[in-house]
Amino acid sequence: MTFFDYLIKRKKSVSEMSRSELRRQELLLEKDRKQMLDKVLKLAKDKQGLFERGAKEKTPEARQMLAQEFELRTTEQLMLQRQLNIRTKELLTVSRLRMLRENADRMKGGGKLGLISAKDMMRLGKLIEADSVKVEMYQERLDEVLALGREADEHAATNNEAGRAVMDIWEKLDRGEIADANEGFDEADRRVRERQQAAE
């Protein structure tokens, strides 16, 4: 049973979960996602080591064995990346639901959580399980389903832009356009701060 099946089939629906229950689920998902990410990073490091060993190795049989190990770790890494994509979307869903619950509790009017129907949850479940739906696309669909206000959408869009700015810096580091990692960090930090200030 996937996490989302659990959310749909449990006696208490997601829209009825309290802030603390949603936060508990959020923490569990964060922990699970971190463990998956650690495994992905370890596999990447292992692959780097295998590649370096293969580059130094001159025996064809040994190289073939190292190439097979490299391929196996790549397959495992890709499988974990798919699971990580799903877990990230699940975490995003629970985090958004918790934020809505907090806002609803503050307004004491029930907020938008009551608008999340079983049909909406099924739709989200399908999007979570679909490998082709990446986190950015899922976030847009999630916002639609949850019918977040324009202000929240603008804030999320700003966060997405800031994230893309950091990704852009990393890519520039990879290509050698930025030579120093500290310089890259400073630039990424500056860009994210600028976007956050512009949103305020």
Image (spheres, rainbow, N blue to C red):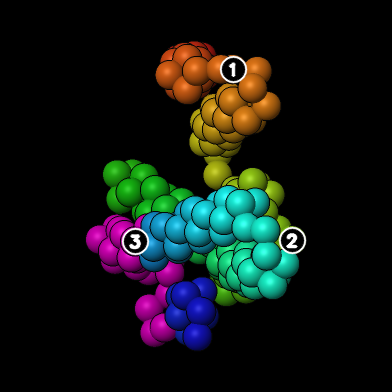
- Which of these two is toward me, 129 or 187? 187
Query: Looking at the picture, which amino acid does disc 2 mark?
Result: Ser
Give the secondary structure at mark 1.
loop
Say which residue appears at 55% left-offset and 33% top-offset.
163
Q: Is residue 116 visible?
A: no
Q: Which mark is residue 132?
A: 2
Q: Which residue is mark 3?
A: 31
Q: Which residue is mark 1?
A: 178
Cα distance, mark 1 to mark 2?
A: 32 Å
Cα distance, mark 3 to mark 1?
A: 33 Å
Residue 186 as seen in the image, left or right of residue 59: left
| Label 1 Cα crowd, 10 Å radius (few <14 / some 14-19 / many 20+) | some
Q: Is residue 18 magenta?
A: yes
Task: Spot the residue most to the left.
Answer: 20
95 relative to 189, above or below: below
Cα distance, mark 3 to mark 2?
A: 24 Å
Give the secondary structure at mark 3.
helix
Say which residue appears at 57% left-offset and 74% top-offset.
118
- Whichever of labels 3 and 1 marks the residue nearer the N terminus, that label is 3
Query: Looking at the picture, which amino acid does disc 1 mark?
Result: Ile
| Label 2 Cα crowd, 10 Å radius (few <14 / some 14-19 / many 20+) | few
Q: Is residue 163 visible?
A: yes
